[in-house]
Image: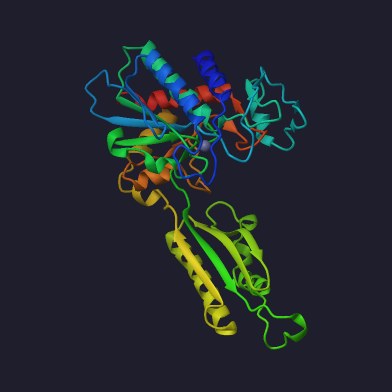
Amino acid sequence: MREKILDYFLKYVKIDTMSMEDMDTIPSTKKQFDLAKILVNDLNELGIKDVKLTDNCFVTGILPSNCNSKLHIGFLAHMDTIPGFSGTNVKPNIVKNYDGSIIKLKGIELNPNQFPFMNNLTGKTLITTDGTTVLGADDKAGIADIMGMLVYYKNNPDIKHVNIHVAFTPDEEIGGGIKAFDVKGFGCDYAYTVDGGLYNEINYENFNAASCKVTINGLDIHPGSAKGQMKNASLILMEFNSLLPINERPEYTDGYDGFNHLCSISGEVGNASAYYIIRNHSIDILNRQKNDFINACDFINKKYGDNTCQIELKDAYLNMKTLIDKDPRCIDRALNAIKKLGFIPNTSPIRGGTDGAVLTQMGLNTPNLGTGGYNCHGPYEFACLEEMENVCKILIEIAKES
Ligand SMILES: [Zn+2]
């Protein structure tokens, strides 16, 4: 099984599937079809039923139940890699029986002093980059884990399982690809994204998310005759920012603490603008944070005149926990599976969003499971083969008739 997972993984990471921001098509890049077509072949080769590839680059397939189970469980993983760092010409580097030392790659090194969790991985097989690209373990490790589960059930027809639905999806890294997914057609009672880190991870709490665009309209006149006249938009924007709580910046928060993050700012005397993202696991606190923006805007307008400051607040996605709590079968099943294998479940809250948050809002409860990948989104990314195998075992256990 381990070898099979490795074969799939090495095949998939070599295919460039980088997505791209600010495109109005799904998928954002045509090259995601390169992997989609290979996955269609691999699923068909395994004898998976109803294998489909949509125009939006979603690959789906079904392994029907071999018992009386009427349960339909979905497993999803995304095909794309992060836009910000090259996914072209990925040359995976296999470190067998890792000895705990520094792994030297082109121009960078994986140092256990910098990444202490590497100390837990001695004796294991690590798959790293060559130092110049991402690896794409996010989320091709998830895809290989799911394929491993399918191989297992194909090779062990006597072991009873529920209806297993799989989906490999585009454009997760840029957010939004999943909105084009046919949730109803997928036909599942609930599902899992296999897109986390640690193999024993199960996440079903994510941020509630909003954003705020701030525009300041200033008054630009010659500085020599500016007294009592000039309204310097850049300075007013700095004042606006100073009205927001300093301790609610990402660099001062972790765990369940939310934040307001200033993503970008630009300004001249005449006008200035800034873009913030606002995050919190608690919707009440998120609303209070949004109110801080409204209050800051009011303050500026009282001080400098109406319409000096304009804000545009937008909601993005919600914490899936609120919805999953109403039907927690998916959590119970995953927790039982992880425990049954003798692993200790890790249920830390996600400090971000997931495709699962969107799917849950679309009516399909979808918590997130681990993959066995580490340090995603850069050249330090690597995967641990034994942990990928553990994930595969967890998926098998989840799909087992119970
Ligand atoms: Zn991912």
Q: Residue at x 37, y 13 (%)?
A: 154
The one nearer the camera, 382 or 221, is: 221
The one nearer the camera, 121 or 351, is: 351
The one nearer the camera, 297 or 245, is: 297
| Position in image of residue 14 (x %, y %) | 58, 22
Q: Residue at x 55, y 29 (%)?
A: 372
Q: Which of the 4 quarters of the picture holds residue 315? A: bottom left
From this view, report whether residue 179 is shown above or below residue 71: below
Q: Is residue 398 left or right of residue 386?
A: left
Q: Residue at x 39, y 19 (%)?
A: 43
- Give the total of numbered labels: 0
Asked if residue 342 shows in the view, the reply is no
From this view, report whether residue 115 is shown above or below residue 5: below
Q: Which of the 4 quarters of the picture holds residue 183? A: top left
Tell me the quadrant of the picture where the C terminus can be found.
Answer: top left
| Position in image of residue 179 (x %, y %) | 39, 43
| Position in image of residue 151 (x %, y %) | 41, 15
- Considering every residue shown, the one lying at the far bottom of the view is 228
- Considering every residue shown, the one lying at the far front of the view is 222
From this view, report whether residue 88 is shown above or below residue 309: above
Model colouring: rainbow
Q: Is residue 246 left or right of residue 173?
A: right
The one nearer the camera, 104 or 220, is: 220
Asked if residue 376 shows in the view, the reply is yes
| Position in image of residue 182 (x %, y %) | 32, 38
